[in-house]
Image: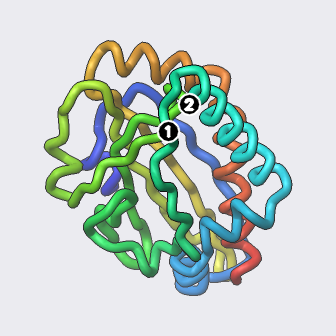
Amino acid sequence: MLIDELMPEYDAIRTEHLITDMPVERAWDAVLDADFIETATSSKLVRGLFAVRTAGEKVVQTVTRRAPGPQPEPESMRLRDMEAEGEWILLGRVEPIEIAFGAIGRFWSGETVWKQITPEEFTRFEDPGFARLACNFSLREYGPERTLISYECRTRATSEDARKAFMRYWRPMSPFIGMVLRAQLRMIARQG
C-alpha cells in the first residue's frame, strides 16, 4: 500500500473502517468528494472537539503571551481538490483502491504549526520538533454492491523530544481522533 511506502515506521496509528452500500467506483468518488470542513462543521461531536482544541490553544497563547498567527479557514477541503504543495497535500493515489495524503506539523503544544511542503519534502523531512502525518483511504470490494472503506492515519515524530511531547498528546486524544475519522467515514457514506 502507498501508506506503507510513505511511512513504514510510525509512533502512533489509528485506523477506522466502514462498510458502505455502494460499489467500489461509487465509493471512490464519495471518498474524493467528501468535504473534511463540512464534517467538522456539521458533526456536533467533531465541532465540539475542535472548539475544545481551539480554547486550549487560546489559553496557551494567553499564558505564553504569543499572538495568534493568521488562521484562514478554507471553504472546503476535498481530496479531489487536494494539491501536491501546501500544508495538507496529496501524496499519491491508485484509483480506485487507495489515496494517500499528509502533512508535517507541530500540533500538540498548544500552538498548531503546519509546514508548507511537497511530496518529495514529506518523505525527506527530518527537522527536529515536528511530526509527519500520513493518512489514507483504502477501498476493497465487500460483495457485489458493497465496499469496505478504511481510513488510516500514521504519525512519526522527527526527534525524541517531539516524540515524547506527541505521545503525551496522543494517549488521551486517540479515542477522540478515532471519532473524527469515523465522522469522515459517515460523511463519505452519505455522499454515495
Q: Is residue 150 left or right of residue 10?
A: right
Q: Do the residues labelled 1 and 2 touch (CB within 8 Å)?
A: yes
Image point (31%, 63%), residue name: 86
| Disc on the earlier residue, 1 or 2 | 2
Q: Is residue 168 left or right of residue 163?
A: right
The kind of residue tagged 2 is Gln
Choose between 5 and 72: the one closer to the eye: 72
In the displayed structure image, the side of residue 162 where residue 142 appears, left or right: right
Whole-percent x and y of residue 101?
38, 59
Helix, strand or loop status at disc 2: helix
Residue 67 marker: 1
Image quarter for residue 119? bottom left
Q: Residues within 10 Å of mark 1 (few under 14, many from 20)?
A: few
Residue 70 placement (x, y as % from top left): 47, 54
Quarter of the picture containing the N terminus is: bottom left
Question: Which residue in the structure is indicated by mark 2?
Answer: 61
Q: Regarding mark 1 in the picture, which secondary structure is present there?
A: loop
Residue in the image at 30% along x and 14% along y: 160
Q: Residue at x 44, y 52 (%)?
A: 135
Residue 57 place in picture, x, y as percent: 60, 34
Q: Which amino acid does label 1 sit on?
A: Ala
Q: Nearer the viewer, residue 32 or 95?
A: 32
Q: In which quarter of the image is the C terminus?
A: bottom right
* Residue depicted at 67% across the width and 62% down the height: 185
